[in-house]
Amino acid sequence: MRNIWTIAKREFLHYFKSPIAYIVALAVFLVIGIYFVVIMYFVMNQALTSGSSTAPDISIVVSPMATIFLFATPALTMRLLADEQRMGTLELLLTAPVRDAELVIGKWLGSFLFVLTIIAVSFIYPVVLNRLTLPGIDQGVMIAGYVAIILMVGTYLAIGTAMSSFFSNQIAAFFATLGTLLFFWWLVRLPTYIIQTGFINSLCTYLDLNGRFNSMMAGSIALSDAIYPVSLIVLSLIVGSVAVEMKRWR
Amino acid sequence: MIRTSGLTKDYGSRRAVENLTFEANQGEVVGFLGPNGAGKTTTMRILAGYMPPTYGTANIAGFDVVEESIEVRRRVGYLPETVPLYPDMTVFEYLKFMADLRHLPDPEEMVDNALELVQLEHRADGYISNLSKGMRQRVGLAQALLHKPEVLILDEPTIGLDPAQVVEVRSIIREIGKERTVLLSTHILSEAQQLCNRVLIINKGHIVAEDSPDNLQARLVGAERCIVRVKGDADELAPQISKIKGVQDVKARPDGALEFQFAPGQDVRPDVAKAVIKSGFDLLELTPVGMSLEEIFLELTRDDSSAKKEH
């Protein structure tokens, strides 16, 4: 546990020295900010012209965040283990008294803490939204929305960490992560439009990460919706650990 | 402290190390010599717990490198060939990170001690990216020494250092070698000669010779050689020297001196000195010359094909 924390702390602090991390943070805040302003402008305009308007909920912050993180997290995770291999520092970590799983979990946790920091800063939007709407935003939906986004980015980052352990080239790790995320977020849903019943439909619906996210965004978190991303995180971290272990045998 | 038995490592179909069996004890500095691709780095990586062997076993301080890898890694200080550093960290941050990973009781103090040992205290707050190659090498060495390991494995520790730093690092290694076990690989044969109690010469994954540098010389030369330098033309002296009992193979050297061989343990130098004086020459020098470690190394690691060509 101590090793996980030591590695996570180093990764977390490293992000603050990395231009990519600032670019990702900027992209996230820029997209959410523009989206928020445009929606609020539209809603307020509607309220002014027709006398009333439906207040937007937390989804105007969390939904764009889920999409932008889909593209941004591979940039955050691509170097995690790939760069260690390129620089030769993986040899240092693998000859230190650290288990392979501790290394992979620590790397993931460091990136997760960094993204949580970005998510924490985004909390300013629900505070503003709460002040602008009457009788304020639904706190239950807000919590569910934030739990959903946290589970999603946790999954994105775990998949990214696993992919980074396979490659010594960051670009390869980036695209492998992006491809896998697009599969779980979007591609896996497509067969359900054609095959509307049976095992294939059930399987694709089960694997669809976007479906789970939308279900949680509705305001209630079903246990199965939460267990699925958590299982993906655990599975990805196991795959990452096995990939690191395999490097020793090559 | 280090004990290997039948250590073999295959990379796919290529065998990098084959049936390596050796020991290194406490208080011993063992040198690993061999040409590039001989299997030195692979062996060191196995011993440092980085990769398991394909066959055979290796023990460090009584712990198996595969079964008890974490225990082995706790006891080993390892400096790989490519010094593994994080350029975005300061020297202190980097060493503190490693101290934390090793759960050292007083990490700051241990870092300070290691920095003092490699004489880098003044650069503790400098970023690693701004350090020279030699300084980086010393940071790598500090990392390996940080936890006062029982076994120190150093893959070409003096590479890239300036002559003054080489002397410092060698003196550190010599000092550590008095109490602990040091296994180091080097291309600099004089370094092995100066530092090591024992030398393992490895070629194509096999140990081709193992002994102290002095014994290796004696064993491989088979006979002792001497040079004799006199004032005047030494060629005229050659027939006189050849007549002495036990002297063989007298030949003139390009520098004007004479070189001759004699069987080990049968020191003919007093007789040679007397013969020189008796012949009316002024004796300037009578020195034994050994086969240098370079010559031994080349002899042992010479490719079979090139050896055939020469004959």
Image (cartoon, coloured by chain):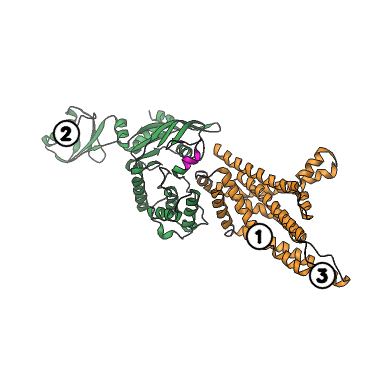
Chain colours: A orange, B green
Crowd rating for badge 1 (residues with CA inside 10 Å; few <14, some 14–19, many 20+): some
| Residue A126: quarter of image | bottom right
Kind of residue at disc 3: Met
| Residue A201: quarter of image | top right
Nearer the viewer's eye, disc 2 or disc 3?
3
Q: Which residue is mark 3?
A: A44
Residues at discs 2 and 3 both on one chain: no
Instruction: Chain letter for mark 1, please.
Output: A
Residue B10 appearing in the image: yes
Q: Which mark is residue B272?
A: 2
Quarter of the figure that contains the C terminus of chain A = top right
Kind of residue at disc 1: Ile
Residue at the extreme right: A50
Q: Is residue B70 magenta?
A: yes
Q: Nearer the viewer, residue A116 or B31?
A: A116
Q: Which mark is residue B25?
A: none
Kind of residue at disc 2: Val
- Against B119, residue B299 (above or below) is above
Give percent across and percent down for residue B76: 44, 43
Q: Which residues are magenta?
A: B61-73
Classify residue A79 as left or right of residue A64. Answer: left
Q: Is residue B14 magenta?
A: no
User: Marks 2/1: CA distance?
Assistant: 87 Å
Classify residue B262 as left or right of residue B202. Answer: left
Classify residue A25 as left or right of residue A216. Answer: left
Residue at image position (36%, 33%) is: B210
Instruction: Chain letter for mark 3, please.
Output: A
Q: Which mark is residue A118?
A: 1
User: Marks 3/1: CA distance?
Assistant: 27 Å
**SS type, badge 3:** helix
Q: Are marks 2 and 1 in contact (CB under 8 Å)?
A: no
Residue B48 appearing in the image: no
